Image (cartoon, rainbow, N blue to C red):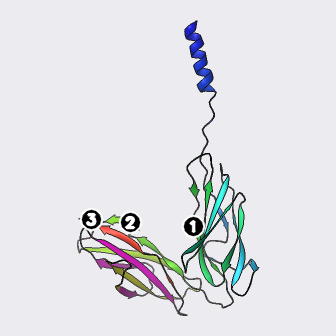
Amino acid sequence: MRKIIVFGVFLFVFGCSKDEVKGPSSAILVFPLQNSECTTGVDINETARLITFQWEASDNTQTYKLTVENLLTNSPQVVSTNQTSAQVEVTKGTPYAWHVVSENTKVTTSATSETWNFFNAGTIRTHIPFPANLMSPLSGETVLRDINNEVALTWSGLDLDSDIETYEVFFSESNPPTQWTTMGTNEINELKVSVEEDTVYYWRIKTIDAEGNSSNTGVYSFKVLE
């Protein structure tokens, strides 16, 4: 009888425990659209506009953290809200990136949405190119040389005017990289560079369009295996 009672208490204590709280899922971005020109919003003055950023609700989420980054200055604005939209003041004639982090105080994990780029329209009808997307090697990656002791730097670019003319590829062992090479635009943008084993290299790209507008990426680094 005693064993039955003890077993019953065990079931009561552990069988009635609270369900585990699930972490939040990633929010789906809605507006401004990816790789678009944003012309809507409330004009504040000649240089700034108030845009309402929107996304879909994500599961198991209490709050959202919206980050809007000026891609020319790499300066972010962060807004926390429990709604699925938030207004942010942004500079006209400037490319931006934005994403949303879903959070729940009952768990330690969070979920990050995709990152979308957009161009906030200005009074001058020309667009600054988006900073190039550095594809390979990824920052912090360790890579192998090919048989020619080279590594291929690859990237992609985008300008809403479709008038990118050149890329300046900066690459060296120093940070920031100082040596640079001018490249034209191709369907696949690639530059092979000579490297040595067990060495860390740094690279970044400046994108220049036909109007003389330009944008810069951040600095990526990679290490070559011995």
Amino acid, disc 3: Leu
Question: How many neighbours does mark 3 have within 10 angstroms: few (below 14), some (14-19), or many (20 or more)?
Answer: few
Q: Which residue is mark 1?
A: 115
If you read the primary sequence from the N terminus, does the residue marked by circle 3 or circle 2 appear first? 2
- The part of the image, by quadrant, that contains residue 35 is bottom right
Residue at point 69%, 82% (across, down) = 48
Q: Nearer the viewer, residue 160 or 82?
A: 82
Nearer mark to the viewer, of 1 and 2: 2
Marks 3 and 2 close (CB-CB < 8 Å): no
Amino acid type, mark 1 = Thr
Q: Give the answer, above or below, for where 149 lies relative to 11.
A: below
* Magenta-highlighted residues: 180-209
CA distance separating discs 3 and 2: 12 Å
CA gap between label 1 and label 2 equals 20 Å
Q: Pinpoint residue 86: horizontal percent, then vertical percent.
A: 71, 66
Label 3 to label 1, Cα distance in Å?
A: 31 Å
Q: Which mark is residue 140?
A: 2
Residue at the extreme top? 1
Image-based side of 127 in relation to 145, left or right: right
Q: Quadrant of the C terminus?
A: bottom left
Residue contact between numbered discs 3 and 1, judged by CB atoms under 8 Å: no
Q: Which mark is residue 225?
A: 3
Q: Quadrant of residue 219?
A: bottom left
The N terminus: image quadrant: top right
